[in-house]
Image: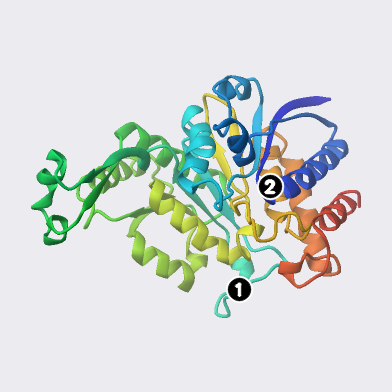
């Protein structure tokens, strides 16, 4: 019997509600396929921060490195912990610490799920956004400079509004040739494996970001030459955002720098019924990968037992596939689809009355059929 050790960080808000349900489904799929899982839970997140002034301990990365994968629920208590503290102190620390360079978000509308476009058939959409996950504008480099400092004086002449300000902030993004190349190669490799359009589209904006995106574009052209069987093209990210709503069926694999990818993944989530329906993964080739539903901690519904666990369950399916169990992953996806099509056990956001646990129980039942 195959076995895997999984580090579990439920985190905050609905993370504590959807992660146990995801584990329930993962274990059920494992029983069907002869796979054993050992889950170890870590109580890190904003509550830990309020008690210990840190999102997770200094030893956290060393502890997590002992596991095959990380399963994260959500992080955030914005009323009491600033968002930039919560995200940088846990999510980005893990992504950067394990060099999880590819954030992968598949978008394939689910049978029975919500679909808001009326000019496209949902079954025609099957795309993946691959987001560079460790570079760009999310490095955290920069500083705020009050008026009167030498740095303020240096920048104040660049724009009339600068000199009239009491403070300016500089945020620096860095793009490396190697960082661009590896995420693009990942995207092209993915396009060769998928039963899709065999197309990779780069999201860029070199007409405004003349250094970072010029490098990005040049590396993309170089990588594309190594994959003659894959159609390669680029679009400015603003135009792509529009086209994703007009003709989403025309896309296969999208590769994007960190900031653009962050925005595009939430935009494309609309095509799958919202963030509560989408899976997400942060992949590394040198350490454990982290599997993280993208919906956040949703403090407005936390503790009510009404959160939709679909995203956490499908994220668990991505983890199964990453660990070498594609058949188990497909079983979970099929079971979720069966429950959604049935329509009798749906959470409140889908128009039903089922609780978080009841929905997951229905998925487990479908796995056994």
Location of the N terminus (image quadrant):
top right
Question: Is 152 placed left or right of 281 in the picture?
Answer: left
Q: Residue at x 69, y 60 (%)?
A: 301
Mark 1 nearby-residue class (10 Å; few <14, some 14–19, many ≥20): few
Q: Is residue 337 above or below residue 6?
A: below
Label of residue 15 in the image: 2
- Secondary structure state at the residue bearing disc 2: helix
- Please state which of residues 77 and 260 is positioned toward the viewer in this rendering: 77
Label of residue 257 in the image: none
- Please state which of residues 103 and 91 is positioned toward the viewer in this rendering: 91
Question: Is 216 placed left or right of 160 in the picture?
Answer: right
Instruction: Please name the colour scheme applied to the rendered image.
Output: rainbow
Between label 1 and label 2, give the one nearer the viewer.
2
- Please state which of residues 285 and 143 is positioned toward the viewer in this rendering: 143
Mark 2 nearby-residue class (10 Å; few <14, some 14–19, many ≥20): many
Q: Position of residue 68 (x, y in %)?
A: 66, 26
| Residue with the mark numbered 1 | 121
- Secondary structure state at the residue bearing disc 1: loop
């Amino acid at each position: 019997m195959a076995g895997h050790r999984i580090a579990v960080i439920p985190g905050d808000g609905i993370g504590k509600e959807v992660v146990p349900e995801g584990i329930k489904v993962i274990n059920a799929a494992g029983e069907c396929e002869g796979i054993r899982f050992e889950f170890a839970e870590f109580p890190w997140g904003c509550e830990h921060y309020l008690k210990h002034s840190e999102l997770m301990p200094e030893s956290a990365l060393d502890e997590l490195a002992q596991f095959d994968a990380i399963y994260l629920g959500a992080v955030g208590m914005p009323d009491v912990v600033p968002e930039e503290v919560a995200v940088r102190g846990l999510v980005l620390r893990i992504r950067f610490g394990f060099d999880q360079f590819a954030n992968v978000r598949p978008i394939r509308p689910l049978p029975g799920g919500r679909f808001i476009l009326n000019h496209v058939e949902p079954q025609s959409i099957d795309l993946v956004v691959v987001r560079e996950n460790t570079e760009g504008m999310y490095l955290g480099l920069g500083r705020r400079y009050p008026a009167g400092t030498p740095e303020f004086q240096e920048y104040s002449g660049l724009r009339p509004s600068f000199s009239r300000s009491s403070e300016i902030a500089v945020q620096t993004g860095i793009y490396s040739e190697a960082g661009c190349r590896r995420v693009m190669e990942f995207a092209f490799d993915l396009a060769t494996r998928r039963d899709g359009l065999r197309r990779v589209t780069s999201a860029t904006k070199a007409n405004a970001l003349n250094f970072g995106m010029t490098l990005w574009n040049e590396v993309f052209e170089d990588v594309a030459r190594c994959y003659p069987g894959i159609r390669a093209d680029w679009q400015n990210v603003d135009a792509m955002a529009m086209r994703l709503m007009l003709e989403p069926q025309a896309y296969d694999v999208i590769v994007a720098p960190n900031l653009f990818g962050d925005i595009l993944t939430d935009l494309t989530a609309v095509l799958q019924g919202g963030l509560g329906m989408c899976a997400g993964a942060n992949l590394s080739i040198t350490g454990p990968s982290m599997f993280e539903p993208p919906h956040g901690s949703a403090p407005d519904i936390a503790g009510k037992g009404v959160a939709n666990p679909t995203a956490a369950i499908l994220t668990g399916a991505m983890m199964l596939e990453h660990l070498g169990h594609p058949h188990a992953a497909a079983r979970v996806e099929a079971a979720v689809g069966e429950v959604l099509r049935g329509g009798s056990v749906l959470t409140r956001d889908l128009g039903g009355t089922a609780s978080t646990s009841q929905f997951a129980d229905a998925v487990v039942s479908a796995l056994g059929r």
